[in-house]
Amino acid sequence: MATPKEASKRHGELVREIRAHDYRYYVLDDPTVTDAAYDALYAELRELERAHPELATEDSPTRRVGGGPRTDLKTVPHVERMMSLDNTYDEGELDEFLRRVGDGLPDGAAVSYCVEPKLDGASIEVLYRNGRLAGGATRGDGVSGEEVTENLRTIRSLPLVIPHEGPLTLRGEVVIYRRDLERINLERVQMGEPPFANPRNAAAGSVRMIDPREVAKRPLRVIVYGAVEGPSIAKTHSETLEKLAEWGLPTHGKHRNCRTREELRAAIAEIDRSRDVYPYETDGAVVKVDSYQQQHILGETAKFPRWAIAYKFSAEQAKTRLRNIVVQVGRTGALTPVAIVDPVQLAGTTVSRASLHNTDIIAELDVRIGDLVTIQKAGEIIPQIVGVHPEARSGDEVPFQMPRECPVCGTRVERREDEVAVRCPNRRCPAIVKGSIIHFSRRYAMDIDQLGEVLVDQLVDGGLVKDVADLYDLRVEQLSELERMGEKSAENVVAGIRASRERTLDRLLTGVGIEHVGQVAARQLAEAGGSLPRMLEWSEAEAREHVAGIAGFGPKMVESVVSFLFDPVQRALLEELAKRGVSRPQPMPEAAREGPLTGFSFCVTGVLSRKREDVHAAIRAAGGSVNDSVKKGTTYLVAGEKVGKSKLDQAKKHGTKVIDERALERLLGNEPL
Ligand code: IVH
């Protein structure tokens, strides 16, 4: 074992190296090591701290996630009031602002402005004391906010230590990159949780969670846009931003200095043009008087600083009439209100439905059926109602009330203590049964593409199927009696269902919809279980032990899996599936093979000439590894037809080589070089 002195020296080296890699990866978006190399450093650090616990100080990278969940968040006063910005929407209003600034300063004063993106996330305050991350709070009411220090510590773009000893109170925004939101929303949908409406909601919700371990799983980032102690750091705001960046803090790095109205307009237009390629949502530009001395002279109104203004970009919005709010019931039983609006053109498509997400939002906006509403579409995201126009009311509008009974089966709904969602608890509810069958047959699960929504409706409504096990008993004669179903298609459906019995256990575990278990976790669970019959032999204690031993399975996941396996209804279902021979044993993860592709990692995307799974298998057989997404260290992105832009962007970002299918075949040795 190392002597304490050697250990301490190595500890220092590792901490410095990991911090440097975190900075390159999370702040500069430009990593220089592979995931594996980073993980090895991190593992060594953890090991060293286990042997020498005295080295594990508060600011060690291993201490990003400390204690357990709290019961609530404390309210703390801000160092200085967190003000909001006055908004302008056009150049006339911007000219107004420039005129007011001119009027507020001594005659003939030269004014320099700093123009920067307005980040659309959740506002936060971050404190560093003696060079260490010492506190953080949400904006709250501007005077005090909720203390979220432990949560902020989990955000790796935020350094735990900076080379500046003086007090430093930063203002910034917690954001989620669009590409990260796409990924977590996909996972959430797979796990039966509602997707986030937009990156801002996701960021604001995540930063206020009470369990830092859960926060650590969300891909949050902080982007700093100012410092309260700015005047003690530099003479101008833009110099402060540059100093903060030098200290390793995550700034947006996109500010421009302007002197004239024309320069300002060009800088704003430039941000508007580029915002599609920024990884985060930007809803405007902020124009700030750059000199702190001039800011001080201008002062503030009761609400806003007089030295800054937000120039908001017009989101794609439209006004329309809210005709009705219908309530849908998903496969998990969650009731979701959906707005039905008069069809209207928005961002190039006709919109007739909009999202309302949950009852809290309905109450917050006070939306009533019959109201004139503003709907908005941001990026790829589903349109949502963002405002109402009470001045246009006739008095006949009707407030919406979440039904107390499930609109599909009439069972009294329930609200779990820790959730916003209201659920139908009846597992035989046709909406839940239909949703479960659709989920079961999805491509990423049992892949039964003959089962469309219309057929599933017919099967459930006709009483032919009451759970997924019943699918395997369907006979051609029964199906061919259904409307619009010929003998040939009936045979196809039965064959498709039968073929799905050959899917491996992980697909089945994904398909049955265990809360908090997506594709990746299902595969790990399947590897731990081996086969469905084997898993069914586990006692409850054995199950708990096996599942708790899976890497990355926290208490919530373990609980969810164990209670699923021992829930009488779910267990009976799994037994019925086992009886019908559904699912093959899970192949054990192969020890990495040696081959021409050893050491290379691949992501395969788009439409290829053969099934993606087969391409994956070929890569693995040649010693390569495969990922679902392009990450740092991914060597090749194999792009088929119709490849998505986000994958290409990621490849560009991580320096991943993009190759076509033929090039892959050459690497595999199947085509001449
Ligand atoms: S400066 C006193 N700069 O916009 C001026 N704010 O209504 C303080 N925001 O909630 C704000 N990007 O969190 C400033 N580059 C930026 C910003 C920014 C986003 C947010 C801020 C606040 C809101 C202002």
Image (cartoon, grey):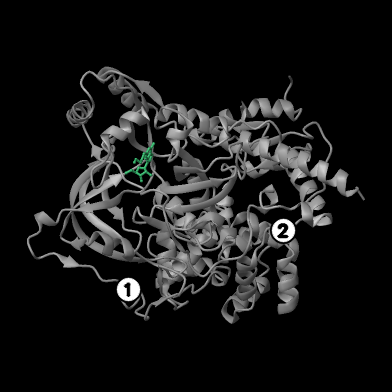
Report the image quarter containing ligand 1. Answer: top left
How dense is the environment of label 2, judged by Cα within 10 Å: few (below 14), some, or many (20 and up)?
few
Amino acid type assigned to the residue bearing label 2 in the image: Ala
Between the C-alphas of marks 1 and 2, the distance is: 40 Å
Residue to which mark 1 is pinned: 407
The local secondary structure at tag 1 comes to: loop
Of tags 1 and 2, which is closer to the observer?
A: 2
Instruction: Name the one closer to the observer, 220 or 542.
Output: 220
Amino acid type assigned to the residue bearing label 1 in the image: Pro
Left or right for 241, reference 521: left
Q: In this view, does 659 lie above or below 38?
A: above
Label 1 close to label 2 by CB (< 8 Å): no
The residue drawn where x is 79% and y is 35% is 598
Kindly indicate the quadrant of the structure image that contains residue 32.
Answer: top right
| Residue 409 pos. (x, y %) | 36, 77
Q: Which mark is residue 650?
A: none
Q: Can residue 523 be seen in this view?
A: yes
Instruction: Name the one closer to the observer, 87 or 474.
Output: 87
Instruction: Name the one closer to the observer, 56 or 131.
Output: 131
Furthest toward the right, the residue is 1
| Residue 474 pos. (x, y %) | 54, 69
| Residue 493 pos. (x, y %) | 52, 59
The residue drawn where x is 62% and y is 32% is 638
Q: Can residue 584 be seen in this view?
A: no
Left or right for 554, reference 405: right
Q: Which mark is residue 551?
A: 2
Q: Earlier in the sequence, mark 1 or mark 2?
A: 1
